[in-house]
Amino acid sequence: MATQDGSEEVIMETEAKSKEAEAEAEAELGECAEKGEAEALSDAGNATTQDSSISNGDNIDEKQEMVDLKIIWNKIKYDLKIPVDSTGAKLKESIHSLTGLPPAMQKVMYKGLLPEDKTLREIKITNGAKIMVVGSTINDVLAVNTPKEVIQQEVKAEENKKEPLCRQKQHRKVLDKGKPDDVMPAVKGTKERLPTVPLSGMYNKSGGKVRLTFKLEQDQLWIGTKERTEKVPMGSIKNVVSEPIEGHEDYSMMAFQLGPTEASQYWVYWVPAQFVDAIKDTVLGKWQYF
């Protein structure tokens, strides 16, 4: 019996140690499992944070208000989607990407020459708007024999040598008729964009009534009289000169040089002063080199 009791004690002691070892092993496994879950949760949290930051970046772009435009250059139409808060200068860069036409060589028009410092929202450009682009490549510029810049400088030099235009006999006979009754109102000391309607009520060199219509989509200037309408490509106009009318400085006299010499100038009298700069910019553009 003693032997049996001793054996039983040994067996019970062994079983107790075995159970204790199992308990320790389970505890270690539990700690490892908790650590693994914690690390997994940490990794998942990091991944969530990264994904969230990427998503937020995308959402910022998606929230920008975009506008769809039709860009027309050289009789080719291009579709362009651009943020409505982009400036005119940024639009020119996008047009460069589409057409290969450098921004400095672009004359961009939307109801007149597009200002570079204003946003499309400020200019009130909306979806589907047609943007006209006029411009020549460097090769086109180099191919021209007589640069417009040279012509403009020569004309300016000649003007400085002469007496004021409004005192010259050829102009006095028209100006002495007085201001036309139906001429458009003028505002001195201001600059405005071209109106959406033709400029009318003015005189030409012969004293007849003349109106100017700026067809931006065709890049043409229409000079209309009672007898006919002359459709002149803006690119063919070599220069535009103007001078305020003495005693009526809110109006100007203006000449469009249609050929290589001053003899080809087409004179228009009583042009409202606020539109003079807009006319020059629209016809010649600020980028012209020829």
Image: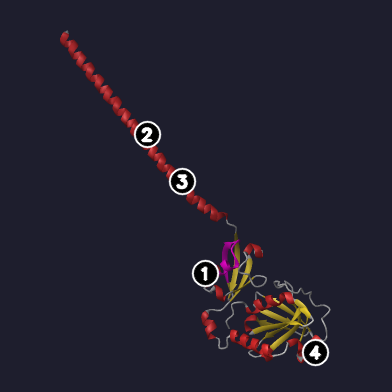
SS category of the residue bearing label 2: helix
Hey, what amino acid is under mark 1?
Ser
The residue tagged 4 is 173
Say which label, 1 or 2, has the lower sequence index.
Answer: 2
Is tag 2's residue or tag 4's residue first in the polypeptide sequence? Answer: 2
**For discs 4 and 3, the disc positioned in front in the rendered view:** 4
Query: Which residue is at 53% across, 79% downward?
Result: 137
Answer whether labels 2 and 4 touch (C-beta < 8 Å). no
Q: CA distance from mark 3 to mark 1?
A: 36 Å
Please say whether residue 127 is visible from this viewpoint: no
- Which part of the image, by quadrant, shows the C terminus? bottom right
Q: Nearer the viewer, mark 1 or mark 4?
A: 4
Residue matched to label 1: 97
Q: Which residues are magenta?
A: 77-93
Q: Tell me where residue 55 appears, x and y as whole percent.
A: 50, 50
Instruction: Residue type at mark 4: give it.
Output: Lys
Q: Is any atom of residue 236 visible in this view?
A: yes
Q: Earlier in the sequence, mark 4 or mark 3?
A: 3
Q: Are marks 2 and 3 in contact (CB under 8 Å)?
A: no
Q: Which residue is mark 3?
A: 49
Q: Relative to the observer, which residue lies in front, 9 or 278?
A: 278
Disc 2 crowd rating (10 Å Cα; few below 14, some 14-19, many 20+) is: few
Name the residue beneath numbered marker 2: 34
Secondary structure at badge 4 equals helix
Q: Which tag, 2 or 3, sits closer to the chain's start? A: 2
Quadrant housing residue 83: bottom right
Residue 145 image position (x, y, % from top left) = 55, 88
Frontmost of labels 3 and 1 is 3
